[in-house]
Image (cartoon, rainbow, N blue to C red):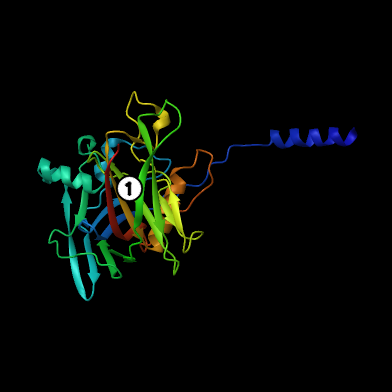
Amino acid sequence: MKSILVLALAILLLASCEREFTPEISQEAPDLVVEGYIEAGENPLPPYVILTRSKSFYGDIDPGDFDELYVHDAQVTVHNNGIDYPLTEICLNALTEEQKAFVSQMLGLNADSITANLCFYVDVSMQLNGQEGQRYDLTIVENGKQHEATTTIPRLVPIDSFFFQALPGDQLKDYRELHAFLTDPGDGLDYWRYFTSINDSAYVRPNFSIYDDGFISGQTIEFVPNNGVKPAEGEDPLAFGLYKVGDSLSLKWASIDKAHYQFEKTAEFSANQGPFSSYVRIKGNVSDALGIWGGMNIQYLQAKIE
C-alpha cells in the first residue's frame, strides 16, 4: 500500500512540473525549393522546373504571399550527352487562356482555381527529349549560389491489364473499383508512381500512389489504383478512391528512379500523418536546396467506366 502511495505522489509531482515546450525556429534565410521533372515514353511533357522559397512552419500563410515565393531570373540548365539545354522562365499571366489551360493541365492544376501568377522554367525549344537509360544533370544558379541534381530515366515496367469491379450492395452501385495487373521483371529494383485524370481534368496524385518491388520481385501482382479526385459535393463520401460509372479515366503510370521514389515516399508519408505525427525529413536530391529533379518513363491507360 505504501509503495502505491509513493508511486502516486511521484506521478503527481511529475505532472506538476510539466511546461510547454516550444522548439527553436531557425531565423536563417528561406531555402530554395525545387520541383522538376523530365519524361520519356508516351506523350512526354517538356522538361520543367518550379522554383520557390520555403516558408516557416509557424509563419502566417496568406494567399497574397504566393507570388512572392516564386524565384525569378534564375539560370536553369539541363545537361545531357555533352549538350546544355537552357530552360526559359514563363509565368501564367503572360500566356493566353488556351496556353494557360494547357500548362495548368500539364502541372496537375485547375486553371479556374489558380489565383497566383504561377511561374516555372521550361524547355521552350522542345529540343530536349527524355530517353530511357539517359542521365540528365540539372544546374540552377540563383542569388550567387549554384545547386545541382542528377536523375536517370529508368526502364518502363508497364501495367499489363486492368478492369473495373462492381462493389457489393446497392449503396455504391454507381461506382467501380479499379484493379490492375503488373509483372515485375525480377532482375533489379523498380519504383513507380501514378496519377489519375477524370474526364480530361488535370492529373492528380492519389494518396498511397508510390510503389516499389521490394516484396514482389519476379511476380505478377494485382493491385488497386485509387482515384485521386474527391467525390463532388452531394456524392457519397464512401466513394472516395472509387470511379463513377459514365466517367472517363486516364491513368498516368510512371517508372521512376530510387532518389525520386525516396522523395515521393517521404513526402507522401509526411502529408498523410495526423497532427501528432512524428517528425519526417523529406529526402530530396538537389544540393543545398529542398526538392526533387526526377526522371519518369510514362505509360498512359484510358478507359470509359462502364
Q: Amino acid type of disc 1?
A: Phe
Q: In which quadrant of the rendered view does residue 207 lie?
A: top left
Q: Residues within 10 Å of mark 1 (few under 14, many from 20)?
A: many
Residue 31 visible to an observer of this rendering? no
Query: In the image, what residue occupies the spot 49% across and 59% down?
Result: 216
Left or right of 131, for residue 288: right
Residue at point 22%, 65% (across, down): 77
Q: Nearer the viewer, residue 239 or 205?
A: 239
Q: Secondary structure at mark 1?
A: strand
In the picture, which quadrant includes the C terminus?
Answer: top left
Q: Position of residue 177 (x, y in %)?
A: 39, 39
Decide: is 96 above or below 2. Answer: below
Q: Residue furthest right?
A: 1
Left or right: 80 with respect to 54? left
**Percent position (x, y) of residue 152?**
32, 67
In front of the other: 187 or 229: 187
Q: Is residue 154 above or below residue 5?
A: below
Residue nearest the viewer, comparing 23 with 116: 116
Q: Which residue is mark 1?
A: 195
Task: Report if residue 263 is visible in the image.
Answer: yes
Which residue is pictured at 25% across the width and 44% down the height?
A: 68
Q: Which residue is located at x 43 percent, y 40 percent?
A: 58
Residue 274 in the image, given as x and y percentages of width and height: 50, 39
The quadrant in which residue 113 appears is top left
